[in-house]
Image (cartoon, grey):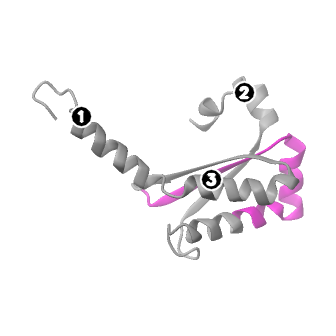
Amino acid sequence: MSQNNIPSEEDFARAKAYMEELDAGFDKVSENIKKHYGKDNVHKVFLFYSPKIDTFGAYVFFLKNDQVDEAKKSGLSSQIEEAIRNELENVGRGDRNLLKLNVEFDSHENVEKDYEGDYYDRLR
């Protein structure tokens, strides 16, 4: 960093490379989960990794609130969690059995109602 605390182009490039490393494979995991479970009303999937606590976070959004409840009752939410573990392993993020993974289920309906449709606000 320069003497006046303004990041240099190299600082930005290093930060970008680090962020890309943290997010490696997430687009593919999200795409595969949506493709496989889209018929079950999975609408969006977001993945994050926190190196500080060495944990992955997955946020799975169904279309409607009642679909979230039904997925939990039917065991679909557990199937999706296992699929996320498998997909993370497939993209080289670690052994599925050793991954620390927190999965949260919500709905697009809830995001519309409580966050004016803004997923960024919902995920903060």
Element under disc 1: helix
In the displayed structure image, the side of residue 117 where residue 62 appears, left or right: right
- Identified by mark 1, the residue type is Glu
Q: Mark 2 or mark 1, which is nearer the start of the sequence? A: 1
The residues tagged by marks 3 and 1 sit, at their Cα atoms, a distance apart of 32 Å
The residue to which callout 1 is attached is 9
Quarter of the image that includes the N terminus? top left
In the displayed structure image, the side of residue 84 where residue 18 appears, left or right: left
How busy is the neighbourhood of tag 2: few (under 14 within 10 Å), some, or many (20 plus)?
Answer: some
How busy is the neighbourhood of tag 1: few (under 14 within 10 Å), some, or many (20 plus)?
Answer: few
Query: What's the magenta region?
Result: 53-81
The residues tagged by marks 3 and 2 sit, at their Cα atoms, a distance apart of 19 Å
Front residue of 33/55: it is: 33
The residue to which callout 3 is attached is 58
Q: Is residue 64 above or below residue 78?
A: above
Q: Based on the displayed image, in which of its 4 quarters is residue 118 positioned?
A: top right
The residue to which callout 2 is attached is 117
> x%, y% of residue 84?
66, 63
Q: Mark 1 or mark 3, which is nearer the start of the sequence? A: 1
Q: Based on the displayed image, in which of its 4 quarters is residue 14 positioned?
A: top left
Q: Is residue 61 magenta?
A: yes
